Image: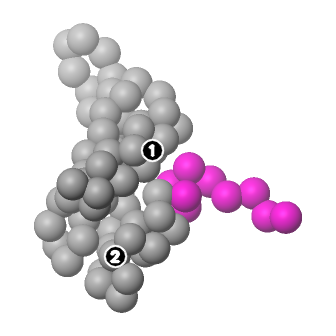
Amino acid sequence: MKNVGSKSKVQNLARLLCGDRPVEVRGTRIRGKGGDEFLSEVAVDGRVVARARHRNWKMSYKILTVELSKAFIA
């Protein structure tokens, strides 16, 4: 069985929830006075539908899966 990365898990979930609409998963490191954070977000049709921040990039993507699920359930 192939190992799936954190970002790929988010992409797979987004494609499952969104169907054929274009999905983009992106992440970036934000540097600030209080320390570094990683911002990850999912955009569907060019509109951001879920966003998460955490110091650890892997945790940021894990939180993003939860936020993405909440966005489509509500």
**Front-lying residue, 71 or 41:** 71
Q: Which mark is residue 18?
A: 2
Q: Is residue 32 above or below residue 50?
A: above
Q: How many marks?
A: 2
The residue positioned farthest toward the top in the image shown: 34
Residue 6 lies in the magenta stretch: yes
Where residue 30 is drawn, which disc sits there?
A: none
Q: Foreground residue, 36 or 74?
A: 74
Please identify the quadrant where the C terminus is shown: bottom left
Q: What residue appears at the point 29 percent right and 84 percent down from the top-left corner?
A: 21
Residue drawn at (27%, 27%) of the image: 31
Q: Is residue 5 magenta?
A: yes
Q: Quadrant of residue 35?
A: top left
The magenta-colored residue range is 1-9
SS under mark 1: helix
**Residue furthest bottom in the image:** 20
Residue at 47% over, 64% down: 13
Closer to the camera, 34 or 53?
Answer: 53
| Quarter of the rendering occupied by the N terminus | bottom right
The circle on residue 61 is 1
Category of crowding for the residue at label 1, using alpha-carbon neighbours closer than 10 angstroms: few (below 14), some (14–19), many (at least 20): many
Which residue is pictured at 30% across the width and 39% down the height? 52
Question: Element under label 2?
Answer: helix
Percent x, y for residue 32? 22, 21
For mark 2, does the 10 Å Cα neighbourhood hold few (<14), some (14 to 19), or many (20 or more) residues? some
Q: In the picture shown, does residue 58 fall above or below 34?
A: below
**Which quarter of the figure has residue 33?**
top left
Q: Position of residue 56 (x, y in %)?
A: 47, 28
Report, in whole angstroms, how far the alpha carbon at label 1 lies from the one at label 2.
Answer: 18 Å
**Above or below, comparing residue 64 to residue 10 in the picture:** above
Q: Decide which of tag 1 and tag 2 comes sooner along the chain.
A: 2
Q: Position of residue 63 (x, y in %)?
A: 41, 38
